Image (spheres, helix red, strand yellow):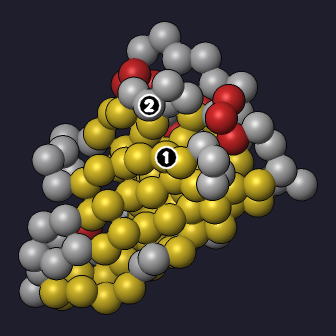
Amino acid sequence: QVQLVESGGGSVQAGGSLRLSCAASGYSFDRACMAWFRQAPGKEREGVAGISTGGTNFYAEYVKGRFTISRDNAKNTVYLQMNSLKPEDTAMYYCAAWTECVLYDKSSLLQESRYNYWGQGTQATVSS
């Protein structure tokens, strides 16, 4: 049974930082591409950052330079370090797994349709 469990969300002031974690189980983590998506109230879900099995990263323009995605295959965990947070980063953040990932173009790391497993989400709220 595949499980993705996010943690690390919370409330911070603008300019602050949060570190999200996603603990995965039930599949071969080291053979999966992983990503973070987010959804703000009244908006569609959007990609934030993705990481391939080999560690290639891809970021959405609106977080580039502020967020960092990483993975620890020994712990079956993917992380999202979020710095210089802005109120517009307020959203529910979801971890997603693309199992048996074969990556031809790193931009596909943020294609929602590629991902076959999703976590329940963790809320990040940034106040001004």
Q: Amino acid at mark 2?
A: Gly
- What residue does disc 2 label? 55
Q: Nearer the viewer, residue 80 or 123?
A: 80
- Neighbours of disc 2 within 10 Å: few (<14), some (14-19), many (20+): some
Task: Classify 76 as above or below 15.
Answer: above
**Taking 40 as reference, is 25 left or right?**
right
- What residue does disc 1 label? 71
User: Which residue does the image show at 17% across and 70% down from the upper left?
Assistant: 85
User: Which residue does the image show at 57% across and 34% down from the upper left?
Assistant: 33
Q: Nearer the viewer, residue 110 or 39?
A: 110
User: Which residue does the image show at 23% across and 81% down from the upper left?
Assistant: 126
Q: Are marks 1 and 2 in contact (CB under 8 Å)?
A: yes
- Marks 1 and 2, how far apart at CA: 8 Å
Task: Classify 37 as above or below 7.
Answer: above
- Neighbours of disc 1 within 10 Å: few (<14), some (14-19), many (20+): many
Q: Amino acid at mark 1?
A: Arg
In percent of width and height, residue 68 lies at 29, 50
Q: Secondary structure at mark 2?
A: loop
**Taking 100 as reference, is 109 left or right?**
left
Decide which of tag 1 and tag 2 comes sooner along the chain.
Answer: 2
Which image quadrant for residue 25? bottom right
Task: Classify 39 as above or below 102.
Answer: below
Farthest residue, direction right: 1
The C terminus sits in image quarter: bottom left
